[in-house]
Amino acid sequence: MVLNFLRGGAAINVLAREIGARVVVADMGVDADLPSDPGLRAVKIRRGTANIARGPAMTIDEASRVTGARRGLVRAELLTGLDVGLTGDMGIANPGAADRRAHHVA
């Protein structure tokens, strides 16, 4: 799916094109090694998240590092003309991980 984002073939890419927005793809936790791509920001914190049926999706330290990485990406994008930033999360079979992380960070 991440490769589809990079190729511009995902639904978010279509929506972004319609309003003239950019999609910035960041690997903060894909459970695979992704190929180098000029459109990919490689800031992996860990490979995947843990099973939330057994405990937290990630540690508080990892969630804090994700927050710091997101801030760094926004700062970098501000230098390239960013005026509005929205973050998203892409997960397959783990929709609760982002929610769990948000609770740790808040």
Image: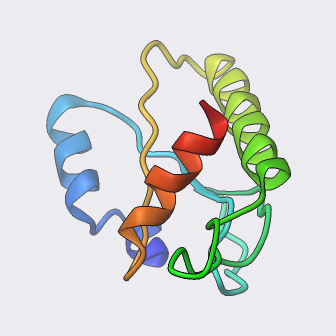
Q: Residue at x 42, y 75 (%)?
A: 94
Is 99 left, or right, of 30 in this rendering? left
Residue most extreme to the bottom: 32
- In the rendered view, would you say 72 is above or below 4? above
Quadrant including the C terminus: top right
Q: Position of residue 86 (x, y in %)?
A: 41, 31
Where residue 48 sits, quadrant-wise, is bottom right
Residue most extreme to the top: 83
- In the rendered view, would you say 15 is above or below 1? above
Q: Position of residue 15 (x, y in %)?
A: 17, 45
Q: Position of residue 47 (x, y in %)?
A: 73, 78
- In the rendered view, would you say 19 is above or below 95? above
Is 4 left, or right, of 9 in this rendering? right
- In the rendered view, would you say 57 is above or below 81? below
Q: Nearer the viewer, residue 20 or 64?
A: 64
Is 17 left, or right, of 40 in this rendering? left
Quadrant including the N terminus: bottom left
Q: Residue at x 68, y 60 (%)?
A: 28
Is 38 left, or right, of 72 in this rendering? left
Q: Residue at x 78, y 41 (%)?
A: 64
Where residue 35 sits, quadrant-wise, is bottom right
Q: What kind of colouring is applied to the model shown?
A: rainbow
Tell how many labels.
Answer: 0
Where residue 49 sits, quadrant-wise, is bottom right
Q: Position of residue 79 (x, y in %)?
A: 69, 18
